[in-house]
Image (cartoon, helix red, strand yellow):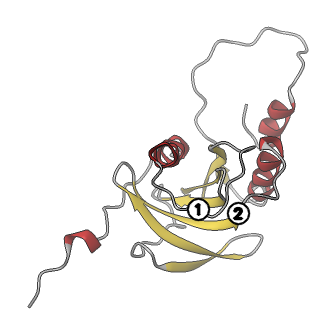
Amino acid sequence: MTEPDPDLAAPPVMVHDIDPAAFLVAHYQELWEQGELEMAEINPALAIEAVGFIRYQGDWLGVVVTPWFLRLFLMPGGGSLWGEIPVGQTRYLSLPAETMQFIADAAPQFGSFQYATLLEPTSLIADMAAARQMALRVMQGFGDQPVEPEPEPDRPAEPPGPTAISRRGFFRRLAGKR
């Protein structure tokens, strides 16, 4: 009987109690800066950013934009949506808009995650504003389902009276964020 290869062992599932978007952004930013990515095409008008992460059926869903892809991510939050599969394997997940194919991956810093590619390469996206709009449109599909909002960080009270809202602020409010 042979011992299992430790490099092929599945990493432990880390259940995220708080929004894991920052982990994903840091992960892809580090890969980008270290030049560890093999990509055919990049869009220099785009940056690495997480958009619209929400709790959905107890787990985390959100879109990550990079200069080389736009993907919907699923991260374990202790809910009913997550299903563990080995790294590199795929599973089909029935979501409100459609059934999507998710691929399993992992990172040592934050454990297992799954993603569905929305657009790759990103050469057809004009700029970050357009990428955010696309991401928010994807996330609006989850708006009619019960979701738990992200916890609000402590921040100072806003002054009373009307204030101008930026385009980004408008879309963030539209997505249920402040």
Q: Nearer the viewer, residue 103 or 98?
A: 103
Image marks 2 and 1: residues in contact by CB distance under 8 Å: yes
Neighbours of disc 2 within 10 Å: few (<14), some (14-19), many (20+): some
How far apart are the two marked residues, 2 and 1, measured between alpha carbons? 9 Å
Would residue 123 appear left or right of 60 to someone viewing this image?
right
Give the amino acid type for the residue marked by disc 1 in the picture.
Met
- Nearest to N terminus: mark 2 or mark 1: 1
Neighbours of disc 1 within 10 Å: few (<14), some (14-19), many (20+): few
- Locate residue 116: give its quadrant: bottom right
Give the amino acid type for the residue marked by disc 2 in the picture.
Pro
- Locate residue 178: give its quadrant: top right
Q: Which x, y percent locates residue 124?
A: 82, 58
Would residue 175 appear left or right of 71 to someone viewing this image?
right
Please give the residue where the numbered disc 1 appears in the rendered image.
39
Q: Which x, y percent locates residue 67?
A: 66, 50
Q: Nearer the viewer, residue 44 or 178?
A: 44
Q: Which x, y percent locates residue 61?
A: 61, 56
- Locate residue 11: give its quadrant: bottom left
Please give the residue where the numbered disc 2 appears in the rendered image.
121
Q: Nearer the viewer, residue 154 or 28?
A: 28
Please tell me whether mark 2 or mark 1 is closer to you in this view. 1
Would residue 38 appear left or right of 172 to someone viewing this image?
left
Would residue 148 appear left or right of 91 to someone viewing this image?
right
How many callouts does the rendering have? 2
